[in-house]
């Protein structure tokens, strides 16, 4: 496993990117490290014959450890600015996802119930679904969902 000191010796950091300090095979000193993997959307960097995601190396570069998971706060996989990265766990990381393909309301945690002709606000908290009410107005349902996420997950709108 690579150490923080090795990263500090190999790279310079600027605006969410790592740059090689010294020339390497087919790479000039000062050139940006890594490339985006088209299948995952994450930027990858090869160090000592091992492939790392750039955000993992940047987190280690600044904080000196690899957390279990790293969350891109703005959900942009290639925005690796250190202020956009936070240590997290799987549950909290999954809470910061956008709308899924199955979402039909256009709002996170809001779905339409044909039986009642109302909008339902439901959030999964620690593996259990919690119902926050039924609403005639979709904007009100979205507001309730945002407030519930803020209360339970410590961030608004995510």
Image (cartoon, grey):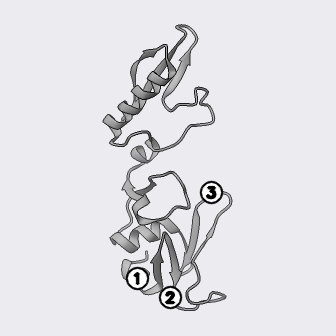
Q: Circle 3 is placed at which residue position?
A: 40
Label 2 sits on a secondary structure element that is: loop
Residue in the picture at 41% in, 33% down? 146
Does residue 143 sit above or below 73 in this rendering?
Answer: above
Q: CA distance from mark 2 to mark 1?
A: 9 Å
Residue drawn at 44 percent across, 70 percent down? 58
Q: Is residue 157 above or below residue 6?
A: above
Disc 3 secondary structure class: loop
User: Could you tell me how far apart the alpha carbons at marks 3 and 1 are, in whole angstroms?
Assistant: 27 Å
Disc 1 secondary structure class: helix
Residue 93 in percent (x, y) is at 43, 48
- In the image, residue 141 lies at what x, y percent? 45, 23
Q: Which sits earlier in the primary sequence, circle 2 or circle 3?
A: 2
Q: Are marks 3 and 1 in contact (CB under 8 Å)?
A: no
**The quarter of the displayed image where residue 145 is located:** top left
> Camera-side residue: 92 or 106?
106
The residue that disc 1 covers is: 8
Mark 2 or 3, closer to the camera: 2
Q: Residue at point 58% right, 66% down?
A: 43
**Quadrant where the image shows the N terminus:** bottom left
Circle 2 is placed at which residue position? 21
């Amino acid at each position: 496993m690579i150490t923080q000191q090795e990263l500090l010796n190999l790279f310079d950091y600027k605006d969410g990117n790592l740059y090689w300090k010294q020339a390497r095979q087919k790479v000039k000193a000062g050139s940006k490290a890594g490339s985006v993997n088209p299948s995952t959307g994450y930027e990858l960097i090869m160090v000592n014959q091992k492939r790392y995601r750039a955000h993992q190396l940047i987190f280690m570069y600044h904080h000196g450890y690899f957390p279990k998971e790293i969350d891109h706060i703005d959900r942009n996989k290639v925005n690796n600015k250190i202020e956009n990265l936070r240590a997290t766990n799987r549950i909290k990381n999954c809470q910061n996802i956008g709308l899924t393909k199955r979402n039909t309301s256009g709002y996170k945690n809001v779905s339409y119930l044909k039986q009642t002709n109302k909008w339902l606000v439901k959030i999964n908290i620690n593996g259990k679904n919690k119902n926050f009410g039924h609403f005639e107005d979709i904007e009100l349902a979205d507001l309730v969902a945002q407030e519930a996420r803020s209360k339970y997950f410590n961030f608004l709108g995510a």
